[in-house]
Image (cartoon, rainbow, N blue to C red):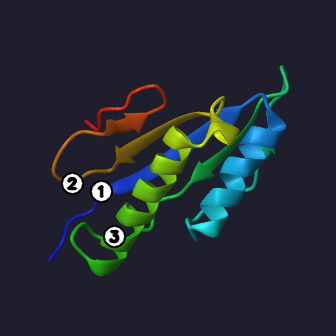
C-alpha cells in the first residue's frame, strides 16, 4: 500500500539550444513531458516533467524516481545544459507539505 506524492519538474531557459537538449534527454529517459512553450518576452522557453501518477513505494513510482535521478544527474553534469534553470518539487503529498526537492545550483539533495 502506498500514498500519493506527486513529483514534477519545471525547466526554463533563454538559450533555445540548451533547453531543447534538456527536453530531448527527458524524452530519451521516457519521462512524461510537455511540449516546449515559448514565453511572452525575453526569448525564454519552458517545459514541464509531469508526475507519473503512481503511489509512493509502487514499482512505477520507483521507476520514475530513478528516471528523474538520471535526468537530474544529466542537468548537473552536462555542460550542454548549464544555463537551464530547473526545480524538482512535490505537490499533493498525503503525508506532508509540498516541497522543493532539488534545484539548479544546489548540489545537495534535500
Place residue 55 in its image quadrant: bottom left
Between the residue at mark 1 and the residue at mark 2, the CA separation in whole angstroms equals 7 Å
What is the x, y in percent for residue 64?
41, 67
Which mark is first along the chain, 1 or 3? 1
Quadrant housing residue 96: top left
Do the numbered discs 1 and 2 sit on residues whose CB atoms are within 8 Å?
A: yes
Would residue 17 be found to the left or right of residue 98 on screen? right
Residue named by callout 3: 61
Judge by depth and name the residue closer to the eye, 90 or 84: 84
Mark closer to the observer (3, 1): 3
Q: Label 2, secondary structure: give it.
A: loop
Which mark sits nearer the N-terminus, 1 or 2?
1
- As drawn, the label of residue 35 is none
**Nearer to us in this view, 97 or 27:** 27
Q: Name the residue located 21 percent from the left edge and 54 percent from the top edge.
A: 94
**Which of pointers 2 and 3 lies earlier in the amino acid sequence?**
3
Residue reaching furthest to the top: 42
Q: Quarter of the image for the N terminus: give it.
A: bottom left
- Residue indicated by mark 2: 94
Q: Which mark is residue 5?
A: 1
Is residue 90 toward the left or the right of residue 74 in the image? left
Residues 77 and 83: in front is 77
Element under disc 3: helix
Total residue callouts: 3
Where residue 72 sits: x, y (%)? Answer: 47, 48
Is residue 42 placed above or below 66 in the rendered structure? above
How far from the left and from the top, in percent, is residue 4? 27, 62
In the image, is residue 76 above or below residue 106?
Answer: below
Amino acid at each position: 500500500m502506498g500514498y500519493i506524492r506527486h513529483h514534477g519538474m519545471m525547466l526554463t531557459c533563454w538559450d533555445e539550444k540548451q533547453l531543447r537538449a534538456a527536453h530531448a534527454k527527458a524524452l530519451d529517459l521516457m519521462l512524461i513531458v510537455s511540449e516546449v512553450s515559448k514565453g511572452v518576452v525575453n526569448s525564454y522557453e519552458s517545459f514541464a516533467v509531469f508526475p507519473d501518477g503512481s503511489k509512493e513505494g509502487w514499482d512505477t513510482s520507483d521507476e520514475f524516481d530513478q528516471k528523474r535521478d538520471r535526468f537530474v544527474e544529466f542537468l548537473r553534469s552536462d555542460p550542454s545544459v548549464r544555463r537551464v534553470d530547473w526545480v524538482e518539487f512535490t505537490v499533493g503529498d498525503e503525508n506532508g507539505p509540498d516541497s522543493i526537492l532539488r534545484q539548479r545550483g544546489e548540489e545537495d539533495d534535500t
